[in-house]
Amino acid sequence: MSDEELKKAQFFFDFVVKADRITEQSNERVLKKIHGVLTLASTLIPIVFGLGYFVLTQTKEWKIFSPIFASLVIFLLAIARGILLLKPKQFFYVDVLELINKYKNEALPFIINKSAVTWADIINHNHSVINSREKGINQMLMLIALGFIVLTVTFLALGISMMK
């Protein structure tokens, strides 16, 4: 066991520890984003419902009922997507006891290297969990944008029809 091997193994181990911290922080940020987008979509539903109710009762333009209803459904889909994103996903962690039992008779650089490699594999899996949540956030934002587009077109059409 050379001093160079030990330093190299320690470097990789320290690197993996930092990567794990970054992964945990990334997961927390993604979950906060999901909560923020869920809050936005949840706030839009009563606003659109109230606005739609007011317009329908005041103008008696029932042909705009379908697009307003469609925008509400789209916002509900965004909320449903967000709830699915909050469903617990399998985040992997190092089974320290297993590593100790498996490598207790090995040289220190070997143990450090094996631990770092095992931990790095776990971090890679956890990154895929985070990335799938990021894709889900993008889908939620697209649904909210689509709901806004439908709502905007609806009110533009209503405004044009009322000008005639």
Image: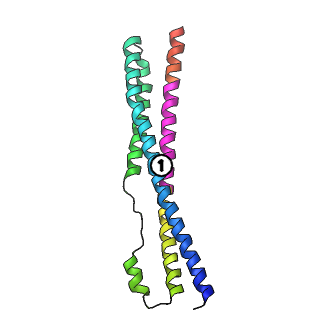
The location of residue 74, given as percent across then percent down, is 43, 35
Residue that appears at 37% across and 22% down: 50
Name the side, left or right, on which 134 lies relative to 51. right
The location of residue 12, given as percent across then percent down, is 57, 75
Residue that appears at 48% across and 51% down: 29
Q: Main secondary structure of the magenta part?
A: helix
The location of residue 86, given as percent across then percent down, is 39, 50
Residue type at the position of mark 1: Gly
Residue that appears at 42% across and 69% down: 93
Name the side, left or right, on which 113 lies relative to 82. right
SS at circle 1: helix
The location of residue 15, given as percent across then percent down, is 56, 71
Count of numbered badges drawn on the protein? 1
Q: Quadrant of the C terminus?
A: top right
Q: Nearer the viewer, residue 60 or 121?
A: 121
Residue that appears at 51% across and 81% down: 112
Let me know if residue 121 appears in the view: yes
Against 113, residue 135 (above or below) is above
Name the side, left or right, on which 38 lies relative to 163. left
Residue behind mark 1: 136
- Characterize the local packing of mark 1: few (<14), some (14-19) or many (20 or more) Cα atoms within 10 angstroms: some
Residue 151 falls inside the magenta stretch: yes
Against 162, residue 12 (above or below) is below
Let me know if residue 127 appears in the view: no
Residue 38 falls inside the magenta stretch: no
Q: What span is colored magenta in the figure?
A: 131-152
Residue found at the very far top of the displayed protein: 164
Against 161, residue 35 (above or below) is below
Q: Nearer the viewer, residue 33 or 88?
A: 33
